[in-house]
Amino acid sequence: MVSRVIPVDVFDLVVFGGTGDLARRKIIPALYRRFRAGQMIEGSRVIGSARSDFDTESYRAFVAEAIDEFIADHASETVAAFLKSVHFVKLDATGKEGWADLAKLMRKDVVQAFYFSVAPSLFGALAERLESHKIATADSRIVVEKPFGRDLASAKELNATLEAHFDEHQIYRIDHYLGKETVQNLMAVRFGNVLFEPLWNALFVDHVQITVAETVGVGGRGAYYDRSGAMRDMVQNHLMQLLCLIAMEPPARFEPDAVRDEKLKVIRALDPVRHDQIVRGQYKADGEQQGYLEDVEHPDSLTESFIALKVHVSNWRWKGTPFYLRTGKRLKARMSEIVVAFKPTPHSIFDEEAGSKTNVLTIRLQPNEGINLRVTIKEPGPGGMRLVDVPLDMTFADALGPVAREIPDAYERLIMDVIRGNQTLFMRGDEVEAAWAWTDPIIESWTSRGSRPHPYDPGTTGPEDSLMLLHRDGRRWREIEDYGTD
Ligand code: NAD
């Protein structure tokens, strides 16, 4: 199978914050890969912009270094060709300097996109100047990164700031989880097959688990992270988006607003979460590394580096099926997966010795993206009927060969979607606000009680109490395991 590359229209993409960490690690490598694949065609330009003292020549050297560092196999001729499309404009988001230069450089007859890879406090200044310097057009797109606020009030403020200068159809709020191949495959599996959808409800699904586990601690982001915590940093956005894609009704068409309308309905159907359905944790120190409290330099911090929650979606489809969410740092392995655990058969025709198994659909986001369905069969051989469950494995790298090995990074797909003008995989303003409206009371419930996160050992699955969250319902988390690399 050969993957098809459909080139996008010629574009000017301005990366505000073009010398920052996100630009270096994600945006530049993503653009280079799309250039190499032939999707970004001649004539398109990447315009880095920042306050830093660069010009086009030195910025090209910066871009070449980023490619060197983050892309293992790159040919020097391709890099040289890509660099010709790279430019730099020095400007201050909050000042006057540089804006006239940017206005002069931009073309009105190509797709224009502006990536706000800067702190959210600068979004307003950038949006305002793009309008007042008549740089943006009615068709320009702006791309913004999380965090979209830290509660409902600040999210509303941020949305209002952007919407004062751009229409909603121009605003692309990135959640890179939505750019992952498997996440889109989840929609293909659900809505492209007749097999799953009739079973996709509380009658047949026992429960759903969503796990995003990291092995790293907060690292150098301690001060930032401590103001946020796992609930704000991961659950309100990434885990919530995954939950929406599992729980949503089939949209009439695979179109941006049709999909986002359905996701929004899920968020609005989420029950408030009682405090006994929440477990929070903080990683301890081990022999080699500091604990959370030392990492954030705040010995009394009550911020969580781990959270597990039991969530209910109150609608006809899901009433009674719990969704268990968990995410944390310094855990046993790095992995993100969704588990849809089906109920047992209504009646077993086999005797007790045969045992019983249930179907489990696992959607692995990282590492080693793929989908796995466990089905029950007879254990081969004589000796009577004994049931075993075996995996029907759709690890993309095995099933699809070279195409899967070329799975684009989430940023590659999402940036190309911006240029194509397709908002399906981006969050709409009302979705973000609805997610905060659900999150705020949860955070408030532990803040008002001054509750302290449970310390947990690094390299484990988090606090013991998170196991109890399922045990007391007669269920178990799937193991947090290392599934290889990606
Ligand atoms: P960074 O601090 O590394 O880079 C910030 C960039 O903004 C630099 O290029 C800097 O020169 C520029 N800048 C700062 N003030 C400016 C001003 N007044 N005028 C013009 N340019 C200015 O930050 P980052 O890690 O690249 O993150 C950028 C944004 O993306 C932040 O909002 C961050 O929360 C978000 N984000 C980053 C990551 C990541 O992996 N780094 C992940 C998700 C979201």
Image (cartoon, rainbow, N blue to C red):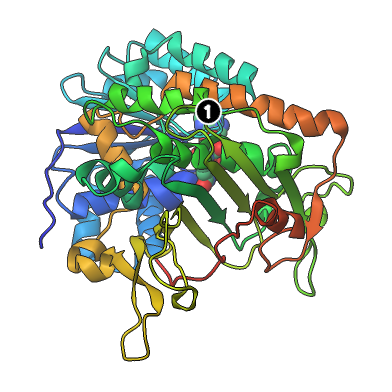
Could you say which is closer to the camera, residue 301 or residue 18?
A: 301
Q: Which residue extends farthest bottom? A: 382
- Relative image position of residue 346 (x, y in whole percent): 42, 53
Residue 20 in view in this figure: yes
151 sits to left or right of 130: right
Report the quarter where the N terminus lies: bottom left
Question: Does the numbered disc 1 mark a residue whose Cβ is under 8 Å from ligand 1?
Answer: no
Residue neighbourhood size for the residue with mark 1, other residues' Cα within 10 Å, grouped as few (<14), some (14–19), many (≥20): some
Of the residues shown, which amino acid type is indicated by label 1?
A: Ser
**Residue on which the image places disc 1:** 314
Could you say which is closer to the camera, residue 426 or residue 279?
A: 279
- Relative image position of residue 32 (x, y in whole percent): 28, 51
Quarter assignment of residue 333: bottom right
Residue at x 51% of width, y 25% of height = 269
- Relative image position of residue 401 (x, y in whole percent): 19, 69
Residue 12 in view in this figure: no
Could you say which is closer to the camera, residue 379 or residue 458?
A: 379
455 sits to left or right of 169: right
Residue at x 49% of width, y 56% of height = 336
Figure check: 306 above or below 419:
below
277 sits to left or right of 125: right
Figure check: 473 above or below 154:
below
- Relative image position of residue 149 (x, y in whole percent): 59, 26
Quarter assignment of residue 41: top left
Report the quarter where the C terminus lies: bottom left
- Circle 1: element type: loop
Figure check: 345 above or below 110:
below
Q: What number of labels is visible?
A: 1
Could you say which is closer to the camera, residue 258 or residue 88?
A: 258
